């Protein structure tokens, strides 16, 4: 069989296979997210829980004209600083998360318990 004919058969099967995957598996909600890395797992765990904000955090957000959606953005795209976090907490782990939201750099401290995540502290700056 000529080499050109082999390529035609190969790419024809590849296209049919991709169409099959797109139409049949694409609508099932299956995803290839990278939630198996430690940073993504911690952020997803916190996002799924009820969030409670301390009065200090709410006052600091209001003084910088931000709202709690900045925290939500940070929990999507932020970086967990494991070196500054306490991952061996007895009742709750404490994580420090840093990232950019609303054109400002935020650094928050989250107490991640079994049923809720409490944002205890926040530091807001214009530069990293």
Image (cartoon, helix red, strand yellow):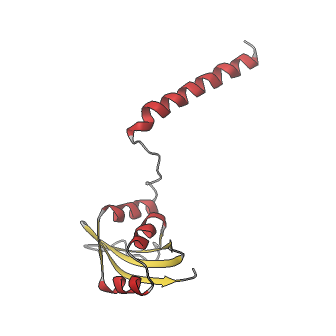
**Of 106 and 112, the residue lying toward us:** 106
- Residue sitting farthest toward the top: 1
Residue pictured at 48% horizontal, 78% vertical: 106
Residue 98 located left or right of residue 117: right
Residue 11 higher or lower than 43, as above or below: above
- Residue sitting farthest toward the front: 65
Residue pictured at 45% horizontal, 85% vertical: 64
Residue pictured at 65% horizontal, 19% vertical: 9
Residue 1 located left or right of residue 118: right
Q: Position of residue 91 (x, y in %)?
A: 25, 73
Q: Position of residue 54 (x, y in %)?
A: 30, 82
Residue 15 sits in quarter:
top right
Residue 44 sits in quarter:
bottom left
Which quadrant of the rendered structure holds the N terminus?
A: top right
**Of 87 and 127, the residue lying toward us:** 127
Q: Position of residue 77 (x, y in %)?
A: 48, 65
């Amino acid at each position: 069989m000529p080499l050109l004919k082999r390529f035609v058969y190969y790419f024809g099967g590849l296209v049919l296979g991709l169409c099959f995957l797109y139409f049949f598996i694409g609508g099932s909600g299956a995803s290839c997210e990278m939630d198996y890395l430690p940073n993504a797992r911690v952020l997803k765990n916190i996002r799924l829980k009820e969030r409670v904000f301390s009065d200090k955090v709410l006052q600091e957000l209001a003084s910088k004209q931000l709202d709690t959606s900045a925290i939500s953005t940070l929990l999507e795209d932020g970086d967990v600083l494991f070196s500054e976090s306490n991952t061996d907490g007895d009742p709750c782990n404490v994580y420090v998360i840093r990232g950019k939201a609303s054109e400002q750099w935020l650094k928050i401290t989250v107490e991640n318990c079994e049923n809720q995540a409490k944002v205890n502290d926040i530091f807001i700056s214009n530069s990293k």
